[in-house]
Amino acid sequence: MSQTVDRALSILPLLAEGPADLGQVADRLGVHKSTALRLLRTLHEHGLVHRQADQRYRLGARLFALAQEAVENLDVREIAHPHLVELNEKCGHTVHLAVHEENEVLYIDKVESRYPVRMYSRIGKPVAITVAAVAKLLLADLPEAERRTLAATLDYPRYTARSTPDATAFLAELAKVREQGWATDLGGHEESINCVAAPVRGTDGRVVAAMSVSAPNVVVSAEELLTLLPLVRRTADAISREYSGSPPTKEA
Amino acid sequence: MSQTVDRALSILPLLAEGPADLGQVADRLGVHKSTALRLLRTLHEHGLVHRQADQRYRLGARLFALAQEAVENLDVREIAHPHLVELNEKCGHTVHLAVHEENEVLYIDKVESRYPVRMYSRIGKPVAITVAAVAKLLLADLPEAERRTLAATLDYPRYTARSTPDATAFLAELAKVREQGWATDLGGHEESINCVAAPVRGTDGRVVAAMSVSAPNVVVSAEELLTLLPLVRRTADAISREYSGSPPTKEA
DNA sequence: ATGGTCGTTGCAGAGCATGCAACACGATCT
DNA sequence: AGATCGTGTTGCATGCTCTGCAACGACCAT
């Protein structure tokens, strides 16, 4: 809607692919070099792009800072986090929290079990939307029309033999998930990994987030993991209650 | 330099503080509502802001994806990561990797301590530049002129009694660090936390990143932590060698 | 019902972004 | 060395595009 801003923002995904110099940016934007220069300068002043030693441009530091701040200020995440930790202490497995946004499902929190992995690296990354247990829960809650059109536009990569094969199967799975109020992913993304997930609901009953427990086959079998379902559901319900319970009361 | 883009980008840090509605955004930008609306629409189309159920705006998913992509495309990080993990496995403490950019020093990778006591830090967050061991290393490598002007413009918050008090002390510390090739932070940021850090250098000998090991007093004393110095330096050197060794060879 | 708040739209005016051309600087080639 | 190319950079006139206004519609509360 705003041409100038539109052009400026188009630079970001372009730089995400890798560093580029002024000429390359101008070409790919289809504008004059001087125009690209001024756009890049503005982005630079805001710290969104960074100029490296060879004068080429890369994405800048403030981008990380913004993303971090944003993720930390999500109310659901804030409320849910202690519950995730508690659940992790009880069962020992990896715990995820995910939300749905703009036809993507992404992790917004994660508690890792054994290996102290890079904590934030996966957060913000879109999940395998056609197979992940949390994705099923979040999408199952969409109005039927949206669900259908979304299912039709998705790709169905066959990560494993048990991946969701096509839109029909996906919609059937969503219907089942919607019915039972919980979801699983049994080796649909990675052969040896299973997940159990439960929804977090807002006051109006809509699913605002989903949490899951994941564990590899070598640690617990799928059957054993399923015995955790009641615990997972209880935790998710606790988060739902707290989320619905106390209104933010911040901001005048 | 470009007013429209400037205004649009100013919305991002504003939303990072928390969700806001159209009126609030317009007020804080000092523009008319209709103007703010069009800017927000453009940001929305690019996925940088997201409109939640209550119609308020928040930062959007693409921001995370961009930050993610950007951080993953940093060659230093990619090369260093396995070394950080290895170091963590050897000593058990929190390991950080940081770079210098636009007068800020920020963590770009982190491996969590295996001890229950964890320190708070996050990838993408600017570090306490006047006291952090990694910051000292990165700034000590700047040309003298830059170092002086930077030191003069910094604030010197007194986090603890042992925080760097002023520019003079800071420059002296940088000179020492530059001389010895490693750095420490002994309770300068948080009373009970100590760090040891070593530099990662590129082919030309310039410091391109710095890594550190941090641990609270209750786990190991400062003296004990210092015994890790040789290990830390060896790890940093290994990263330096690998970083200088094989050129990426990607891109024509 | 009625006042209030909030988001949204169309429009005219002008402020601001645009592309051009020329410059500066370094690298490379003959 | 000198020339030539390829960069990034600047100043400026043109007119496109952004801006603020005012009016409308939707929603909530009193």
Image (spheres, coloured by chain):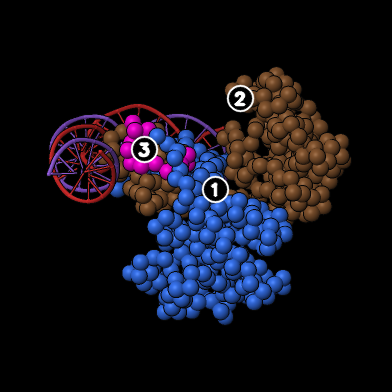
Chain colours: A blue, B brown, C purple, D red
Q: Dot 3, how many residues are within 10 Å of its Cα: few (below 14), some (14-19), or many (20+)?
A: many
Q: Say if the magenta span includes residue B20.
A: yes
Label 1 neighbourhood size at 10 Å, few (<14), some (14-19), many (20+)? some
Same-subunit check for callouts 3 and 2: yes
Give the spatial CA distance, label 1 vs label 2: 32 Å
Q: What is the three-letter code of the residue carrying label 1?
A: Glu
Work out whether disc 1 and disc 2 sit on a shared chain: no
Chain identity of mark 3:
B
- Chain label for disc 1: A
The amino acid sitting under disc 2 is Leu
Determine the secondary structure under disc 2.
loop
User: What range is drawn magenta here?
Assistant: B16-30
Give me the residue at 54% from left, 49% from top.
A79
Do we see residue B225 in this rendering?
Answer: no
* Rendered location of residue A206, percent (x, y): 41, 60
| The one of C28 and A134 positioned closer to us in this rendering | A134
Horizontal relation, residue B27 to residue B75: left or right? left
What residue is disc 3 on?
B25
Q: Can you tell which mark lies on residue A78? A: 1
Is label 3 or label 1 in front?
1
Q: Amino acid at mark 3?
A: Val
**How far apart are the alpha carbons under marks 3 and 2?**
30 Å
Q: Earlier in the sequence, mark 3 or mark 2?
A: 3
Q: Is residue A191 left or right of residue B225?
A: left
Q: Secondary structure at mark 3?
A: helix
In the depicted structure, whether residue B150 falls above or below residue B132: above
Residue with the mark numbered 2? B154
Whether residue B68 is in magenta: the answer is no
